[in-house]
Image: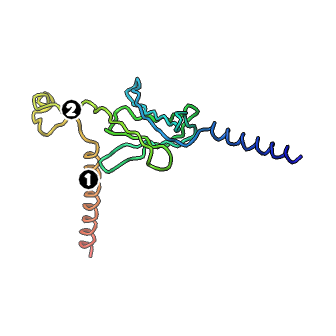
């Protein structure tokens, strides 16, 4: 009876070890590729594999982007059964360098330099020749009145009107004495 029990324990141990290996070993390698989407966005795909080259499922992958002040954490995704995790950057990619980090430590990293977006000329407002048709004094007229300036003008006008009303009340009270 005792040898049968040892055999059963050995079989259970073997099944447990096999299941742990089948789920995926420790991440040993990470690779990062980009895919440009139809809408102009960029998809980052990180593939995590173990020492034998088998995909690692369930590994935590952190996507980072370099900014002027250091590394910005964009997202943290877990790998699927194929050992890949992905994240999509918006259409105007403002980052020049991205990285993917596997696991809790920063030991496994893969990075890419992204292509720079084309620089466009700044959009200019119409010149004096276009504004002359709208006003005899084109310097005082803009076809794009800023909403913020109009808001501040209305706010200040209300404040000044309130002060004028208070001063008129004080003058009337002084005359009534």
Residue at horizontal 29 percent and vertical 52 percent from the top: 155
Of 86 and 21, the residue lying toward us: 21
- The first of marks 2 and 1 along the sequence is 2
Q: Cβ–Cβ below 8 Å for labels 2 and 1?
A: no
Q: On the rendered image, what quadrant is the C terminus found in?
A: bottom left
Residue that sits furthest to the bottom in the current view: 177
Residue marked by disc 2: 123
Is 45 left or right of 68, judged from the image as shown?
A: right
Is 145 left or right of 131, judged from the image as shown?
A: right
Above or below for 106 versus 89: below
Is 30 left or right of 79, judged from the image as shown?
A: left
Per the model, the C-alpha gap separating discs 2 and 1 is 33 Å
Of 90 and 34, the residue lying toward us: 34
Above or below for 18 versus 39: below
Residue 62 point in image, percent of width and height: 46, 43
The answer to which image quadrant residue 38 occupies is top left
Marking on residue 78: none
Residue at horizontal 37 percent and vertical 31 percent from the top: 91
Above or below for 65 versus 116: below
Of 23 and 71, the residue lying toward us: 23
Is 2 left or right of 90, judged from the image as shown?
A: right
Residue marked by disc 1: 157
Residue 15 point in image, percent of width and height: 72, 39
Residue at horizontal 57 percent and vertical 37 percent from the top: 57
């Amino acid at each position: 009876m005792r040898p049968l029990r040892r055999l059963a324990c050995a079989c259970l141990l073997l099944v447990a070890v096999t299941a742990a290996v089948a789920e995926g070993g420790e991440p040993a390698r990470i690779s990062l590729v980009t895919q440009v989407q139809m809408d102009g966005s960029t998809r980052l795909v990180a593939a995590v594999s173990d020492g034998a080259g088998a995909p690692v499922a369930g590994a935590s992958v952190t996507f980072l982007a370099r900014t002027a002040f250091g590394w910005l954490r964009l997202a943290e995704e877990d790998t699927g059964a194929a050992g890949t995790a992905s994240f999509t950057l918006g259409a105007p990619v403002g980052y020049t360098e991205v990285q993917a980090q596997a696991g809790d430590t920063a030991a496994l990293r893969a990075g890419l330099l992204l292509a720079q977006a084309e620089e466009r000329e700044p959009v200019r407002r119409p010149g004096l020749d276009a504004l002359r048709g709208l006003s005899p004094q084109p310097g005082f007229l803009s076809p794009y009145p800023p909403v913020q300036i109009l808001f501040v003008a209305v706010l200040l006008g209300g404040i000044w009107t309130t002060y004028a009303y208070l001063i008129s009340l004080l003058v009337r009270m002084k005359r009534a004495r």
